[in-house]
Each structure stands twice: as C-alpha cells, then as structure tokens.
Image (cartoon, rainbow, N blue to C red):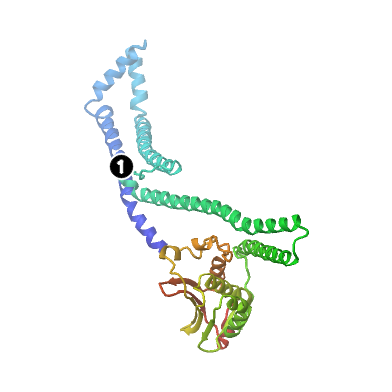
Amino acid sequence: MKSSKKQKTSKKYRSLKFKIMLRTVAFTAIIGVIVYLIYSLLIDGVLQKPFADLMVAFFQKLNMDEATAILVYRTIFWKNKSMILTIFFVILYLVSFYLGLSEFTDYLNEVGEGVDQILEDAPDRIELSNELLPIENRLNEIKNELMVKQYAAIQSEQKKNDLVVYLAHDLKTPLTSIIAYLSLLNEAPDMPLEQRSRYTDISLEKAKRLGELINEFFEITRYNLSNITLEKQMISLNMLFEQLVDEFYPVFEEKQMDCHIDIEEDIELFVDAERMARVFDNLFRNAISYSYPKTPIEVKANIVDDHVRITVRNQGKQIAEHKLNHLFEKFYRLDESRSSNTGGAGLGLAIAKEIVELHGGTIHAESNEKYTEFRVILPYTGVNKKEGVNQ
C-alpha cells in the first residue's frame, strides 16, 4: 500500500522535475549562445576591430598614449581571451543558477505559507502551484486530520466536564441521604427503636451504594491500563453462569424475575475467569435495571465456526438507535437511569467492552420493541485446542 502510494506521488513530481530540467537546459543554452556570440563577434569576429577601437579609445581616456593603450588591449583581451570567456561564462551561469534557485525558493515559500495556514487554523483549502499538487494534497490531508483530532480533543474535554457533573450527581445523592438520616439519628436520641433501626438500615444501604460507585470509578482506571496481563485458564461456561445466577438470586427474587440459561453443550473457554465473570456480571446488572417487572432474562450460548456466541436478552423499553451507539462509552447512561437508585455510573458496559476486546472478541447491542439483547463473541479454544493457544 505504501509502495503504491509512493509510486503515484513520484509520478506526480515528474512534471516538476521535467520543468526544472528544461529550465536548466534553457539557461545553459542561452549562456552558451551569449558566450559564443561574444567570442565570434567581439573577440574573433566581424566586430573585433570596432570593439578594439572602442577599448583603445577607452584606455586613452585614462591618460594612456595610443601604443600603450593597444598593448594593454592585446594583453587583456587578446592573450587572455580564453580566460576572459571562461570567467564570463561562469558569471552568467551563476546568475542563471541564482534565478533558477529563486524560483525553487518561491516553491518553498508557498509550502511555508501552506504550513502557516495549518498552524493558524485557516478555514480555506490550501492551494499551491500546479507543480506542487502532491504537496498541496498532503498538506490538506494533514490539515483535515488535525481538525478531526482537534474536534476529538474538544469532545474529550467535554466528556471530562460531563464526568465532573456525573460525579457530583452520583456521589452526592447517596451521601446526602446518609448525612440526612445520620443527622436525624443524632438529633433524636430518644427515637423509637424500630424507627432508629429503619434509619440505620437506610444509611447503611446508601453507604454501600456510595462504596459501589467509588469502586466503579477506580475500576475503569484499572481497565484503561495498556499493560494488563490476562491470566487465562480453561473455564466451564455453564458453571460460570450457574455461579452468577446464584449471586443474583436475591435480586431476581426481589424483582420477581427468572433467568433462563440455554447453553447447547458444556462449552469451555480459555479466558481470564475473574475478568470474564465481570463482563457477564455487568450485563446481568444492566439487564435487570432495564427489564420490565416479572419478565425473564434469557442467556444463550452456542459455537459458531471458531467462535462462541453468547447472548443476554431482557424484555424492556426499546433503546433508540442513536443511544445504542453510545452504550459502551465511558460514563454514558440512558436518561431514565439518572434518577434511579440502581443506575450505575455508566462504566459497567465500557469495562465489559474493554475486557472482551482484550480477549480478542467483540460485543454489541441490539434493541427493538420486544427485547434488548447484548451479544458477546469470543474466540473458541476448546479442550482440543488448548495446546495450540499462543500466550
């Protein structure tokens, strides 16, 4: 690819090279003609006598007699005519070279002005001479790339600002509740035991919620590090989901929900067990948060070619297409969850995506009026492939 692009650029420069070569040849030819005319007309040609008389008359004006003037003329022009012609030729060639170099520096000035346009963020397209078309195209490419990166930097800064708002909202809500209930407990030492117990339970629940949010913010930093080393081992997919269902059993009971597991066979994966459990833990939490009451969560897994496809489906309100595209961005949450006590900080799906991609897999979401489904696709390295896994 690079070689092909280089060849195309080289072809585009041929016209510039050809123009410079023609100009050099033209200057050399003109100089040669001038020197030849001087030699053939003034030194050894038909104009030799008028030129000699002119020079003798010039020397006589310098207070020389005629004999001395003729001697000086012959000494300078006749005996040293070859050297004079050579010097004259060199002078003319240097002048022509300077003129050619001036045009080359004009090209450099054009390129410099184009670079200035990039640095100054000028909105207009950079335009150079036709001979510099490849450089013009490349400068405009660089300009567009910088504009894209500048826009991305602005977006990133905006996300940081949004994060500050999210932090203030997510951390302040449970903290405010904790302070309020503890203040009530402190101000009313004779509060009935049952009411005191209820306020204490609420404060404890909010404190746990605050701890979960803080852990999530630290978690995203962990999974952003580029030097994460996966500690892979063979795990049973059935066993992984059985453990997750057991952990979520109290939540399912509270919300009167069921979880249906359908794995076509005992699939084994060569993955980092702890981090992969984190992926499906996040998908379960997301499915529970956005499910209609008393509806099931369905989990299916099957082998397709050299991959394992795992889907987690819940029945809930349809997610708009433009929101689906942002689900896996850090700190993004659906609007409905902003006021929810169960809504996370918008990091769970971002973490899940990073873990899946670290394993060489993909994750995406689909949603319609009936259900929302998250699909995880991982490379399949079953028991019979374990020896061939390259770590």
Residue found 42% across the figure and 65% down from its top: 320
322 relative to 382 in the view: left or right: left
Which picture quadrant has residue 220?
bottom right
Q: Residue furthest top?
A: 63
Q: Residue furthest left?
A: 46
250 relative to 116 in the view: left or right: right
Residue found 43% across the figure and 43% down from its top: 121
Q: Nearer the viewer, residue 231 or 369?
A: 369
Residue 65 coordinates in the image, percent (x, y):
34, 11
Residue 334: tell me if it is visible: no
Residue 99, above or below 56: below
Residue 300 coordinates in the image, percent (x, y):
50, 82
Residue found 42% across the figure and 75% down from its top: 370
Q: Which quarter shows the N terminus?
A: bottom left
Residue 264: tell me if it is visible: yes
Q: Nearer the viewer, residue 37 or 228?
A: 228
Residue 19, above or below 70: below
109 relative to 300 in the view: left or right: left
Residue 163, above or below 317: above
Q: Amino acid at mark 1?
A: Arg
274 relative to 22 in the view: left or right: right
Circle 1 residue: 23
Q: Nearer the viewer, residue 211 or 160?
A: 211
